[in-house]
Amino acid sequence: MNTPWGQFSLFHPQFCPHVFFGGLMIGKIIYKVPTREILVGYDNLENVGQIEFRKKITDADDQWTIDNLQQILLTSKQIEFDNLTRGKPDVHILINSPKAFGTLSHSEIWFNEEGALIKLGEDDHRTINKGNADSLKKMIDYKSS
């Protein structure tokens, strides 16, 4: 295309790299806002009923961990609740949607020799095997109390 400044085209080899990298940088700035975040918390021993969150994982920083953690929770085996008092959970995991300003799920997890018991909801109790429990511990940097 001819302009008063001469021939100009965004697709000219001289301009293509600049347009590409400019778009890449704008995309990184715009889409750096996370759509999912995981908060890892432990019961506060001094304040009963209060959860102390020690780790935050976002899909903008670590998509792999978000995907794998959700996959472990979604593929866990649903079980009948046995009404045993388990005491305080070993860890709490909240999955949030920062864009929607809401909590999508709150899981309570008790680790044991066989894996872990998970309470996903009031009437939704699940179990995972030792391999998945060990993977989950690594993903969340689990610290036993």
Image (cartoon, rainbow, N blue to C red):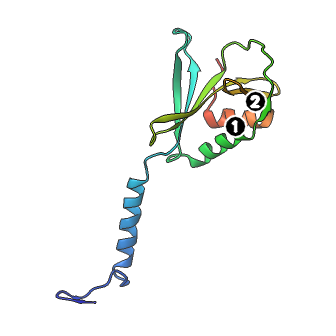
Q: Residues within 10 Å of mark 2 (few under 14, many from 20)?
A: many
Tell me if residue 144 comes above or below residue 132 in the rendering: above
For the residue marked with disc 1, what is the amino acid?
Leu
Contact between marks 2 and 1 (CB within 8 A): the answer is yes
Extreme left residue here? Answer: 4
Q: Secondary structure at mark 1?
A: helix
Vertical placement of 46 versus 128: above or below? above
User: What is the C-alpha distance between the residues marked 2 and 1?
Assistant: 9 Å
Badge 1: few (under 14), some or many (20 or more) residues near its Cα, within 10 Å?
some
Quarter containing the N terminus = bottom left
Left of 42 or right of it: where is 14? left
Quarter holding the C terminus is top right
Q: State the mark number for residue 126.
A: 2
Q: Residue 124: horizontal and vertical position, in percent?
A: 71, 28
Residue at the location (40% across, 71% down)?
20
Residue visible at 39% across and 54% down in the picture:
30
Give residue 83's position: percent from left, percent from top: 78, 15
Dot 2 or dot 1: first in sequence order is 1
Q: Position of residue 53 (x, y in %)?
A: 52, 25
Q: Would you say 53 lies left or right of 79 here?
A: left
| Residue 98 vs residue 52, the one in the foreground | 98
- Callout 2: SS: strand
Marker disc for residue 12: none
70 relative to 114 in the view: left or right: left
Question: Label 1: which residue?
Answer: 73
Residue flagged by tag 2: what amino acid is it? Arg
